[in-house]
Structures are given as C-alpha cells and as structure tokens.
Amino acid sequence: MRILKYCFLSVIFISTSLFAQEPTSTKPQGHTDQNKFRQMKDLLATPNETRTASGAPGYKYTQQQVDYVMDIRLDENTSQIFGDEKITYHNNSKDHLQYLWIQLDQNMRAKDSKTPDVKEESFKTPFNSAQSFTKNNLQERFDGGFNIEHVKNDNGSDLSYTINQTMMRINLAKPLAPGDTFKFEIKWWYNVNNHVTQGGRSGYEAFPDGNNTYVIAQFFPRLCVYNNVEGWQNMQFWGRSEFALEFGNYDVKLTVPADHKMEATGELQNPKDVLTKEQIKRFELAKKSFKDPVFIVTQEEAEAAEKQRSTKLKTWHFKADKVRDFAFATSRKFLWDAMAVDINGRSVMAISLYSKEGNPLWEEHSTRVVANTLEEYSKLAFDYPYSKAVSVHAEMGMEYPMICFNYGRPNEDGTYSERLKRGMIGVITHEVGHNFFPMIVNSDERQWTWMDEGLNSFVETLAELDYDPNYITGNLPKDIVPYMGGDQSNISPIMSQGDYVHQFGPNAYTKPAAGLYMLRQTIMGPELFDYAFRTYSQRWMFKHPTPADFFRSMEDASAMDLDWFWRGWFYTTDYTDIGVKDVKQYYLTDKPTESAKERAKRFKMDLADYPGRFIYYAEAVDGVIPQDAKSASDFAELNTYLESLSPEEKAKLKEAPKHFYEVTFEKPGGLVMPIILEITYEDGTVERKKYPAEIWRYNEFEVKKVFKTNKAITSFVIDPDLETADVDTSNNVWPKDDATAFSKFKEKVKG
Ligand SMILES: [Zn+2]
C-alpha cells in the first residue's frame, strides 16, 4: 500500500497527512460558500479611461470649471441679500450640453417649498406655548426663496429658464460644444432666515443688544456638477443631503455696514479700505505668531462697536481660486483673532470670528483647534493648500472653503461644562476638516453623505485624540454597537442616498468613521492604511471621486483584498458577532482512540497491527486529563526518530507541548471580521493572536483552531479591546463561568 510506505518515512508526516483533522465545523443547509468574500464586480462600475481600475483618475478624466464674479449687498435693516452674479461656464467635457442646471438652494425655504410637505406631522406633542402656537398656527410660512430678477446672456438678452423647486434649468439656444465657454448673468435677492429660530445652514442670529451676526452660505445660484457618473447632479435639495459643486475662481465684492468685521472664502483684496491701520498691523503680527493667537479685534473693541450703528457702507473684496463654493460671515459684534500654522514650511493662517457671547471658550480654543486640525489633516491627507481657515461662532456646524460656522456657547456668566467644551472642539475640528473632504477632495455630497462626513469624522477622530488624548470621540467601533445591533428595519446600508436613510447620523457619520478606524487600527494597520488613504486623498485633490475610486485606491495601494469589508460594512446592515462556542482539551496516549480507529478504517488499516507506532490525541472528558496520559518523551519511536536528527536539526526543535486545545469559534453575526484572541495562561501571562477575516472563507458560521502549549490555558477572550464592533459580547469569554475574565471584559464593554 502506498500509504504504508509513507508511514515508515516519518511519523510526523503521517500525523499530518493521515490523521490531520479535516474541517468538521457545521454549516446551515443550502448555504453557498465564499459569498462574503466574492469580489465586487457586481457592485462597482466598470473601470474606463476616466476612472481606472486602480481607483485613480484616468487619462481622459475631465471636469467642468465655473467662475463667478459677484456683487453682493446685505441690507441689515431688512435682512435681505441682493446679488449681481456673472457666471463663466467652461465645458471641459466631450459632450454637447443642451442646457445647464443650477442649484437654487434657498428655494428650500420658499413659500411653496415641498420640504415641509414631505415631513410627517402628528400631535405627538399635544400642547403648545403661546409662542409656538402662534408660530405653528397663526403665522404665514416664511418666504426665504430666491427672487430671480433676470437671467441674461453676456449680450444682455434674456435667457429662457425653467425652475423646478430647488433646481433651475437654463435652456440654451444652441448646445454648448466641448471646450466652449458660456457667459451669463443672474440678478437675484432673497429674505435671510433667522437660523436660530427657523433653522438652516445659513442665516442670521439676532441678539438682545439689537445686533445680528450673519453667517451666509448657499446664498447665490450655483452650477450643478456635470460628469460622466451622474450626468447633471440635479437631485433636489430637501434640506438634508448637501451639495455637489464644481471648482472655479471667485471674485466677490460684499457691501455691508461700515462698522462690520468680515471673513469670507478667499484673500482680501482691499485691506486698506476696510481695516484700520492698527488692525493691519495686528494681522502682520499674527502672521509671525505660531504659538498663540493675536487679537485683530479685542473684546473691548467689539463691545464698543456693538453699542453703535453705522449708517455708512463698506465694500469688502475677496478673490479665491480653485474653490468649489463661497461663504462669508459679517457683524459689528465680532471679535477677531488669528495665528500662523506651519504646514511643512508654508505658513497658513488659523482665524476665528466670534461674538463676546462665545467667550471665554472661543478665545481660548477656537483658533488653536483650527491650527491643530490643519496640522493633523495635513499629515493624513495632504498639505493644506489654501492660505487660511476661519472658524466662526454661530450655534451650528457647517463647512465651506476656508470658512466654517461652529457652535459652543458658554452660559451667560461665562461658565461652561466639559461636555460643551468637548462639543465645541469636536465641531471646529470637524468643520475645519471638511476643507479636505469635500471642499478639496470634492465628492458628491448629494449622493454620498458618507464620502465627506464619514471620511471627515474618521480623520476628525484622530485629530481630536491628538489635541487631547482623553477626548471622547464617539466615533470608535464600540460607539456604533447600539446602532448596528438595533432594530434592522430602522437601519440602512451606508451606500444609500442621504435623503432616504434612517438614522442619518449613525449611518453617514459614525458607522463609516468607525469602520475606517477599524480598518486602520485592526485590519490594515496604520502603515498600510495611511499610505493608501493618502494616495486616495492626493489622487482626488481638486477632483470628483466616487465611492468606487475610494474602495479601489485603498486596495490598489495596500495589496489587501478588502472587498469583503466594503461589501459587508458599506453595502449591508449586517453586524459583527463572534464568539467561542466550545473549547475541547486533548491529551497524548499510546492507545488507539475510537476516532483514530475510524479514520484508519478508511485506509483499510487496523491500528492494532502497529503497536507503539502512533501518538494518539484523545479528548479529555469534561476537561479531565486521565492519570495515564503520556507526554511526548514517553514515545520510544519519537525518541529514536529525534535522536536520528543532526545536531543542527535538533537545535531548531521546540520543546514538546504539554497541553492541547481545540477551540470552536462561532459567528452568529453576518459580518466577517478578524478574530482577535486574548489567551491567558495559568501563570497569569497573556498572549494575543489575530486571525485575518479570511479565516471565515470556507465556513462563515464556525471555524476551529488548535492551541498547543506548555502552560495550561485558563481563559480565551475574543476582541478584548472592543475593536470590531461586536454587538453581543456574552459569547466572547471562555470559560463562560470564569467570573474574573468575564467581569474584567464586561468593565471594558461598559467603559
Ligand atoms: Zn460634516
């Protein structure tokens, strides 16, 4: 017999070939293998010359450019904004465009807006205060929509246009050819909303001293993105899913009361017209101050300013190149401070604008957090390319190129809770971070909220932990457990359009952020992850990436097949649940075990014919090792064999193991994940092992592993640091009645 020939060659060889355990784990009936690892060919668009299979832009990649020259006037008495807007549209695509689509975001606040119509209403709160009864039942709906006065081409003749809610189609007389440019002009005005009482990402806040602070954005008709993925991105703005915008150059003049202080996207062109000599001098000082912010306008000066009201006007002139949007903040109430940040040898300004109501929190933290954010994001993504980043105090959190609006208001007496401070540091980090995603890595926010919010919340988490190592981020894998383990009918896959998802925050922010954190810390490791993440970020700087470009870049730059992760974490609502189902102990014996006899029968062997030849592994019943159990040195044939080895070969041998365990891992959760295992030995020492997710490739329900050791094992704990968002940790500890291991673990779960 051929098999017997091998027997004489080597005992070791036989034990691995003849008596090796085949996978014996169980699977449900009718289950198809490997589905969790199948490649994403069915989910991702076919690569082409514009978007390559590597995840990089292809050689035929193009994008449109839209330049704006605007004259804007704010009437503080009526809170109305008036605009004269000249647009130059560059058709860089290879397509003839029959029409142009424009976003009229303010129409979400128009009297006939359908946004309130699609909101469910009920008498869930069956009572009202006089104030809210008036608001709900007696007042007309606020009219904050755009009033379009005219749309003209550059000869001054009227252009035909059609408005469909928040979208306006400019009907071109003849199609715009590839490479051609179209110039036109829109004149408009609208009533600015109070963003505190009426909500919104833009508007004014009215203070008891009679002054307003204005944080103004989405305030002008903006071109929609046209590309080879969506055609025109003209899904309506319902108020939730944000924007898709082209890059372009902006030249904007803003006329406001003469005593206002202002910040905006871009570089100020006329400081001498709008700033005092003293303010210009202080700005020069700030440019050299890398440690602490320098006041441009102090609290004293701001308090003096808010007691008066200038009737004169001033015009601020800003220019910005290669930005996808423009926003500004203006008020006489503002304090102003700034400091310099060194981004790899280039100076960038970190700036804050806030009313005295934000102090003392704002002068202490805002500008420093801006600086920290620019430094940290530059490490993870790319060097911050703009000249400044501004944080404005506005009881909301919203981002625009170079400027963002942030909350964090202390009590009237200036006291504040640790929670408020944390919230403020978090929101500033987050909104300043949006400069990178999506202001520069310009993904389509209307389609894919997670591409900017998820990526940004992830980098934000790393930046916050750098600002304060004890920071509670809320974006770690353990933080997403209640959501992922919750009611499945109330959960959507991450890969859903933002207006249609349940639980927007966990769906588009926390889950993708926690997933990326897990990918970096647990699955890929920081070195591989960071290189790939940087590759993606730099490939798509000033371009329009899609989810596929991200998924592909992360794999292409790391040599890791992550399709199982994207497929599970982003395309399904499955959750992680991995546990220890069973642990069996084995011991060595020279007596053939029943299972060895069974196995030998297959080869027509009777083990009684080979006394002393084989070493048998016998299962310890109830974990009890019998008195007559053998150790490796008791086997004469093994000793003889080992003696026959050369001294070099002998020197390489390990000490023979004394304890043998077979562990069955179970996976009731739908997601495949690495198994992170903590093993504790009888002498108290602890060892960690990590098995890649691919351990589940042949059986995603159960898998076994054997542990051969010299010291007895006292416990196994799965995912001891809560890295994998395991929703049910009751099966993570063995022995199940090991109170010490279990309570130690439970404490971590709670923490
Ligand atoms: Zn955000």
Image (cartoon, helix red, strand yellow):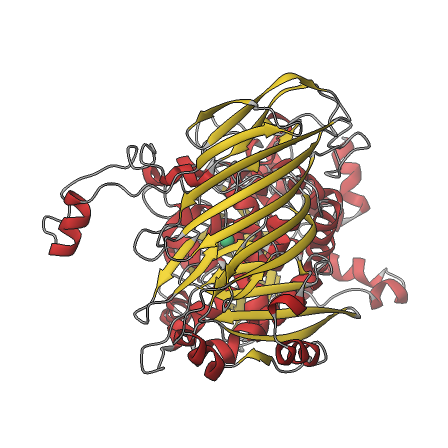
Looking at the image, how many numbered discs can be counted on the residues?
0
Residue 410 point in image, percent of width and height: 37, 76
Closer to the camera in the image, 724 or 709? 724
Q: Residue at x 83, y 65 (%)?
A: 650
Residue 6 point in image, percent of width and height: 78, 40
| The C terminus lies in quadrant | bottom left
Would residue 381 be found to the left or right of residue 235 on screen? right
Residue 413 point in image, percent of width and height: 32, 83
Q: Residue at x 76, y 30 (%)?
A: 1
| Image quadrant in which you'd find residue 638 | bottom right
Location of residue 298 with respect to 76 vertically, above or below: below
| Image quadrant in which you'd find residue 552 | top right
Closer to the camera in the image, 259 or 28? 259
Q: Quick one: which residue is furthest to the front in this view?
A: 312
Q: Is residue 64 visible?
A: yes
Q: Quick one: which residue is furthest to the top in this view?
A: 174
Closer to the camera in the image, 108 or 533? 108
| Image quadrant in which you'd find residue 281 | bottom right
Residue 137 point in image, percent of width and height: 15, 43
Closer to the camera in the image, 70 or 34? 70
Location of residue 335 with respect to 222 vertically, above or below: below
Location of residue 426 with respect to 242 vertically, above or below: below
Would residue 23 be found to the left or right of residue 531 on screen? left
Q: Is residue 627 visible?
A: no
